Image: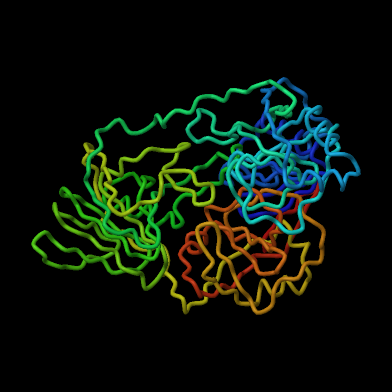
Amino acid sequence: MRFLPVNLSAFMVELQSLEQTMALTDSLNNMPIQGIEEITPAARTILVRYNPIITKINELVREISLRDVSKVELKVSKLVTIPVDYRGEDIAEVAQYLGITIDEVIRRHTENEYQVAFSGFAPGFGYMVSKGAQLNVPRRQSPRVRIPAGSVALAGEFSSVYPQASPGGWQLIGTTDIAVWDIDREEPALLQAGYRVNFIDKARSNVTYSLPISQPIKNRSQQIETTDLTVLAVGLQTLFQDMGRIGQSALGISESGAMDKRALHSANRLVGNSSDSTALEITQGGFKARANRDLLVAITGATCPIQIMTSENEHYEAKTYQPIGLAKGDVIHVGRPSQGVRSYFAVRGGFNVATVLESCSFDTLAQVGPAPLVVGQSLSIKANNQQSAISLNETPAFEYPTSEDVVVLDVVLGPRTDWFTPQAIELLRNQLWQVTAASNRIGLRLAGDVPFEREKQQELPSEGTCIGAIQVPANGQPVLFLNDHPLTGGYPVIGTVCEYHLDLAGQLPVNTKIRFNPLGEFKQFEGSHVEYENK
């Protein structure tokens, strides 16, 4: 095992094979180690996220290094049958590459049982392996812009089914009508780690497969929904957000949640809510709403003008980080920010909105959660019967940046710093990286005068990524992953922004320049020889 640093509360275990990865995953699931909060297995690695208050990385590394990864524990698991129409666009090329016939490709795919090794890329996307199939083929050199949902595909040692339409570079050998992802099912992901999978040829079999029945979401608030707030404008994007969807990596879903969590907490405290209550996240201002009853609201985050027009057409201004009383008929308008990007709008009592997978956050990549707000939508507010106290001394956690600023972000080097040249490491330290207009909640796309140059050119097997990861694609221009990032990625990560600077990263406007500040040298450690230090 190799142990690679990721950030101040996560590290990566690198193993020699998929079988070892599966064995260690089983071991950590069957015999959990205190302090580990979540693991994200991938092809040759496991990303371990832990609580540094409960345990130390040295202790975890020592204990994990003693685990037996010599064999995968075979156990009876759920069997899923997937009927396939084997007329995929690439099946002839797959047969040609392997030097066999199309019929032989189909025979190998259907006569060998697969097992879901891990999930990633998209919700419900299961990476499946089979020892006997012998269908190892490379990805396409030029990925497709759009692959239809239900496409059955091959890449490397894996087979999978695309749960939804998305870009992709896998080789398409067929299609299925089976929905491998349905958010309204009791278990949304049909394919989960450890499940066994049999593919059958629809053209040659009469076997049918019945999916669990989809049901409307059952956990909607039992309170009577009211039309307390009417949305008149949503600006660039207005979403419900809370602390995020933690612990759903087994389904292929990342954390999501508010981009500036300290601003979310302040907004809720200003109106007497629990600090983790759901609020509206408003990007670049432009939000407008009418109060249909008396309400207490607060707006935090980006520095922006707030205007209120009463039902008698009187205008006045309000300030961020202060409670704001709205009378029935008042219209509140959140203007374009002069500093920062995202504002947080909380209302006393909290929004009456249904949770999806234990969170009200909308994940823009996975398309999971309550839908983005639209003009004309009515928002319901929960009744506040606790008469909780409000806070009057909330202030921003940091000075919000402008597009003219240079912002310093602390970075932990790893896990793939050694894939880059020494010159690339110097560029990370010394070059300014500009936030481009192609940035969003998934990540900040950055541009530098000199791109990163890799020392290792081989393809990186998919591995887990976390918020703050600085991933470097083939063009050498990095992407700083934010809250809605993909759970796994196939490009090397040169370093990861420290957790305490993630809220700041979520507030960087387009054209802001970033200077990365590595906290120390890149260090790796093996087995029981542990030296983890950031100087």
In this view, 153 is above or below 219: below
Where does the image place residue 17, in percent across and percent down from the top left?
82, 41
Question: Is 430 on the left-hand or right-hand side of 334?
Answer: right
Image point 64% across, 32% down: which residue? 192
Image coordinates of residue 315 in percent, x first then y, are: 15, 68
Q: Quadrant of the C terminus?
A: bottom right
Residue 491, compared with residue 205, is above or below; it is below
Which residue is depicted at the point 29% across and 49% down?
377
Q: In this view, which residue lies farthest toward the left?
A: 312
Residue under the point 45% across and 37% down: 358
Q: Quadrant of the N terminus?
A: top right
**With respect to residue 525, does 341 lie above or below?**
below
Return the residue nearer the eye: 256 or 189: 189
Colouring chosen for the image of the structure: rainbow
Question: Farthest residue toward the right?
Answer: 99
Q: Residue at x 75, y 25 (%)?
A: 204
Q: In x, y percent, where is residue 515?
A: 59, 73
The one nearer the camera, 154 or 207, is 207
261 or 249, nearer to the observer: 249
| Location of residue 88 in the rendering, given as x and y in whole percent from the top left corner | 72, 43
